[in-house]
Image: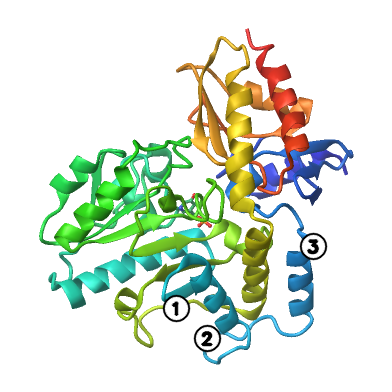
Amino acid sequence: MKSGDYIEMDEKYGAHNYHPLPVVISWALGTKVKDPDGKEYFDFLSAYSAVNQGHRHPRIIKALVDQANVCTLTSRAFHNDRMGLFLKKLCEFTGYDMALPMNTGVEAVETAIKAARRWGAEVKGVPNGKQEVICAEDNFHGRTLVAISMSNDPDSTVNYGPYVPGFVRVPYGDADAIVKAITPNTVAVIVEPIQGEAGVVVPPAGYLAKIREACDKNRVLFIADEVQTGFCRTGKRFAWQHEGARPDIMCLGKALGGGVMPVSAIVADKKVMEVFTPGTHGSTFGGNPLSSSVAIAALEVLEDEKLDQNAERLGKVFRDEIAKIKCPKMVTVRGKGLLNAVVFEKGFEAWNVCLALRDAGLLAKQTHGNIIRFAPPLVITEKEMMEAVAIIKGVFEKIA
Ligand SMILES: *Cc1c(COP(=O)(O)O)cnc(C)c1O
């Protein structure tokens, strides 16, 4: 079958809840993918930062295959001999006391909100049902009803009501707005340290530190949704580390599964995590042996290959090189580490640029019409980065 045949099947049998770039991927390794016709591309999306370690990293694949041959799923009705090792590794990697494993990023967000509401009722003394959580405009926390109840993106929310109450939304990047929104019933503030889906929106310096301070003053939990920014993507293990603003709860996902399995978790210190008692939360697949083995390898790769440092260094190279390109429609290049975006003039259709990039051998996806996110696997080398930059330059310079 040819690429067009696969696309046709997706259209015919699949719900139309995505609008993918017309390209079919049938092979992947490291920073590269190929279509069924054998054409090769740089992957500059990395499955929305779920493939930080590169496609099919040999250590992660070995962990997957070895574990698949021994034991894959036990449920949490019994202990297994992998989950504890995974959670220990995750706590050491993140610097938190305890972790709670789930599967997808949005489940980590749900878990964090549940933890905060329960903490609010049981520790802070907010009457149950009155708990408030402050969130940011233009956030993306996933697709469940809780997550979309925080969202103000019409695509994500229209006609899905009734929405989950208990959320207060304030402008992103404005710490004073958070301070003003805090009431005695506020249990948590949840933000993305950099807004990925909104188009790699980097808040003003000091934003996270001010949130930390406001939360401390008012006995409110600070939740950082690091599902996309975490695991070395922005040049640090976690994006909050750019400001030393340690959250009370981190939501983790995407790259925790090493590009192989859906693995997510929240991490927190004991005083917060203790609100969960037997039967109060759970997941059939959360903490399963296969996910646990894969996640251990995924964390070891990030650590041993110092992918935070590589992201920091090559991110600078990327932004410097892109800024040099002469393209009249380009407004700015922004980001941290290897989470970057090029912003074009308002009203400019970046979709066609993505098609041209595809034809030139590089896959990236536009967001909000005029923004293209560039987020390659963190294992990318300087030589590969310069090849990719040359492709982008060639395409951008042809934009009239
Ligand atoms: C991708 C993402 C999620 C949701 O993760 P899923 O695995 O798709 O459920 C949540 N928060 C942020 C910041 C994300 O980027």
Kindly identify the amino acid type of the residue bearing the numbered disc 2. Arg
* CB contact under 8 Å: marks 1 and 3: no
In the drawing, does residue 240 fall left or right of residue 329? left
Question: Which quarter of the figure has residue 172?
Answer: top left
* Mark in the foreground, 3 or 2: 3
154 shown above or below 259 = above
Neighbor class of circle 1 (other Cα within 10 Å; few <14, some 14-19, many 20+) is some
Residue at the spot x=68%, y=68% of the render? 297
Q: Earlier in the sequence, mark 1 or mark 2?
A: 2
Residue 215, image x, y percentages: 22, 57
* SS assignment at label 1: loop
* CB contact under 8 Å: marks 1 and 2: yes
Please name the residue that numbered disc 1 is placed on: 282
Residue 47, image x, y percentages: 63, 48
In the drawing, does residue 69 fall left or right of residue 316? right
* Mark in the foreground, 1 or 3: 3
Residue at the spot x=44%, y=37% of the render? 198
Neighbor class of circle 3 (other Cα within 10 Å; few <14, some 14-19, many 20+) is some
Q: Earlier in the sequence, mark 1 or mark 3?
A: 3
Q: Nearer the viewer, residue 176 or 358?
A: 176
Residue 337, image x, y percentages: 55, 41
Residue at mark 1 to residue at mark 2: CA–CA distance? 8 Å
In the drawing, does residue 179 fall left or right of residue 223? left
Residue 372, image x, y percentages: 57, 30
Q: Nearer the viewer, residue 159 or 224?
A: 224
Q: Earlier in the sequence, mark 3 or mark 2?
A: 3
Residue at mark 1 to residue at mark 3: CA–CA distance? 31 Å
Residue 12 appears anywhere in the view: yes
Quadrant the N terminus occupies? top right
Tell me the number on the disc at residue 76. Answer: 2
Residue 166 appears anywhere in the view: no
Tell me the number on the disc at residue 58. Answer: 3
